[in-house]
Image (cartoon, rainbow, N blue to C red):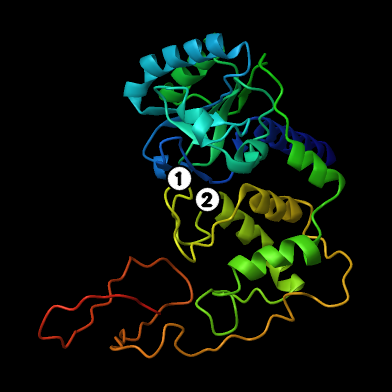
Amino acid sequence: MKKIGFISTLILISFCQSSALAALDRFNDFALLDASGQFHQLSRYQHRKALVLMAYSADCPAMAEQLESYQQAQAKYSGQGIEFLLIDSADLGRSTLASYGLHLPLLEDDGQLVSESFEIRETGEVLVLNPLRSTLYYRGTASEALDSALAEVLAGGLNDTLNTPNTGCPIDYAAAERHRISPPDYATEVAPIIQKNCVGCHRQGGVGPFAMDSHIMIMGWSPMVREVLLNKRMPPTQVDPYVGHSEDARYLSKQELQTLIHWIDAGAPRGEFTADPLETVPEQNSGWVLGEPDFIATAPEQEVPSTGVLDYRYAYIDLSFTEDKWISAVQY
């Protein structure tokens, strides 16, 4: 009996090890604007069999040859449910990117945060992503290996991430390296960004789902904060900062994004302070921010179960108007 038990244990260990080896690397959702201002979010490509990204920089001597190989793969596979994009991992800026005249969407990686999260190290590096399952099929160069990987994706045969060497130019993540050595300070760098852009809604009685009123609250919600910054759910206005200027749009500069993300990645350290800046923010008037409204519409009360998934609900409201009205402002 002891021998049988020992053999069973060996079989179980061997099976677990094999399962661990045959696994696809996972990643998180992200969203970026391209050089023409179009919005791209990874999860919105779930209807595609794969999304292919290549780190682009015209300053790298090897880029022309790599781009040619990449475009050959696009010509072969784009009609088979595979989407091809470029990503500005070098953070060159929209005006520079627009001058290249490329025939592929070129994503602006403001602050290099998406490239950092994918650990892209060189220009020309190619990633083949599964948008539906948030997994990585392939990491490497635009070569025959990429062609083989895409063929396997279409055949449904890739069970673990394929890695091939790439020969591009190194990408400099200066801000990430600086913050790795000295993480952003909560009291003097992080809290002012949150106070300026977030606490207007994220306060007691505000429309935000939680109050950003202390370090402990920010630290507790930091994984969610990181997620919504990278997929651009926050700030909520979703306006293009390169087109005009919208008042109260809560734009976050790339430096502010780097500060927040790198602080969270460092473990959201408390740092040294005598008084938490967010705890000293004065309470805002909980009344009507825009003044007394001309009309109040009350939605019917909803019953929501504690567990499960609900279909999207439309709440219909009767309006007592007898003529057309112009809506100049709305407050929830």
Q: Name the residue beneath numbered marker 2.
A: 231
Q: Where's residue 131, x and y in %?
A: 47, 39
Mark 1 in CB contact with mark 2 (< 8 angstroms): yes
Front residue of this view, candidates 128 and 264: 264
Q: Residue at x 62, y 47 (%)?
A: 254
Question: What is the three-letter code of the residue carrying label 2?
Answer: Asn
Q: Where's residue 215, x and y in %?
A: 76, 71
Residue 43's tag is 1
Front residue of this view, candidates 156 and 16: 156
Looking at the image, residue 164 lies above or below residue 133: above
Front residue of this view, candidates 248 and 46: 248
Looking at the image, residue 194 lies above or below residue 293: above
Q: Locate residue 255 relative to residue 290 in the image: left or right.
A: right
Q: Locate residue 137 relative to residue 180 in the image: left or right.
A: left
Name, please, the residue furthest toward the left: 322
Q: Locate residue 183 relative to residue 228 in the image: left or right.
A: right
Residue 271 picture quarter? bottom right
Q: Which residue is drawn at 38% across and 91% down?
A: 292
